[in-house]
Structures are given as C-alpha cells and as structure tokens.
Amino acid sequence: MSQASIAEAAKVALKDASRFLFFNEQGAVLASSFTVEPSELKPLEALYSDRDEAIKHGMVVLGTRYEVHRHHPPLIYGRTMGAVPEESEGCAICKIAKGLDGQACYGLITYQMPNISARMVPMLQKFCQEHLEAK
C-alpha cells in the first residue's frame, strides 16, 4: 500500500482524529497528517519494551507529553493532563508486529474531546490491522 493511499484511507476512517501518523521500525514515515519530529519515533517504539518506563515517561508527540493510562500491547494510550479534563487531548499507538515489508509498523492518533479512547482506540486498531498488516 502506498503512502498516499494510507493517508487517504486514514483521512476517511480516522476523520475524528486530530492527527495521525504511521511509521515502521526503521523510522520511515508511511503517512502523517503533520510534520513529524524524527527524534520522537524511537521513544514511541520503546514504549513497548518496558511498561513501567512507558508509564513513567509517557508518550511525546510534537513536544506534548501524554500520560500513559493503558499499556496493553499492541495498544498503548493516554491523555494530556491539564487543569481542565474536558480540554485534554488523547493519544493512542498501535503496533503491528508483522507489518508492511515484514517489519513492525506503528499507527498513532491524537484526538480531542468529545472523542474518547473507548471509541478512538478500536478505530485505530481496526485501521492498522486493515492497512498496515502484512497480507
């Protein structure tokens, strides 16, 4: 699947996400709705190595820290922790172990209220299974 087709499919299937990013274990961006900070990709992959470290350090996307509330590989997700919970932003990442080109691939979304993890995380997982999994 081409980068353009992943991006186009994500714009439709994940339309309620404020941002999306798909990348592989080599750090190659497969599709993204924003300018990716390359130095943030390896730490996102490392979330899967150690649950305690993931919870301690959170997820960082575009310099924003998202506290990890759930660490259930292949899914990890959480929210920003500001003064007003209704203004927090969610972030979820899904790992596909045997993805495109036989390597691990990752899908990440951020989402704002009224979109919540209970709705957005399953949408991300379904999208990743359909578009990033090796066929």
Image (cartoon, helix red, strand yellow):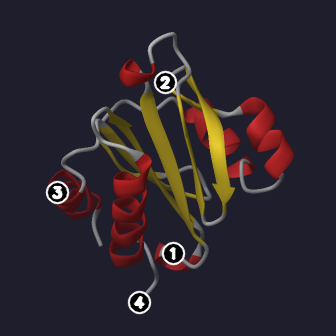
Task: First in sequence, mark 2 or 1: give its number.
Answer: 2
Q: Position of residue 94 (x, y in %)?
A: 52, 60
The residue shown at (40%, 64%) is: 122
The residue shown at (38%, 60%) is: 124
The quarter of the image holding the N terminus is: bottom left
State whether residue 108 is above or below residue 113: below
Task: First in sequence, mark 2 or 3: give its number.
Answer: 3
Residue on which the image places disc 2: 62
- Helix, strand, or loop for circle 1? loop
The reply to whether dot 3 and dot 4 touch (C-beta < 8 Å) is no
Query: Which numbered tag is attached to residue 135?
Result: 4
What amino acid is at disc 4?
Answer: Lys
Task: First in sequence, mark 3 or 4: give its number.
Answer: 3
Q: CA distance from mark 2 to mark 3?
A: 22 Å
Q: CA distance from mark 2 to mark 1?
A: 24 Å
Residue on which the image places disc 3: 8
The quarter of the image holding the C terminus is: bottom left
Q: CA distance from mark 3 to mark 4?
A: 19 Å
Task: First in sequence, mark 1 or 4: give its number.
Answer: 1
In this image, 89 relative to 11: left or right? right
- Of the pair 116 and 61, the residue shown nearer to us: 116
Q: CA distance from mark 4 to mark 2?
A: 31 Å
What amino acid is at disc 3?
Answer: Glu
Task: First in sequence, mark 4 or 2: give its number.
Answer: 2
Q: Position of residue 21 (x, y in %)?
A: 40, 46
Q: Position of residue 119 (x, y in %)?
A: 34, 55
Query: Which numbered tag is attached to residue 99?
Result: 1
What amino acid is at disc 2?
Answer: Leu
- Of the pair 68 and 84, the residue shown nearer to us: 84
The residue shown at (64%, 42%) is: 69
Q: Residues within 10 Å of mark 2 (few under 14, many from 20)?
A: few
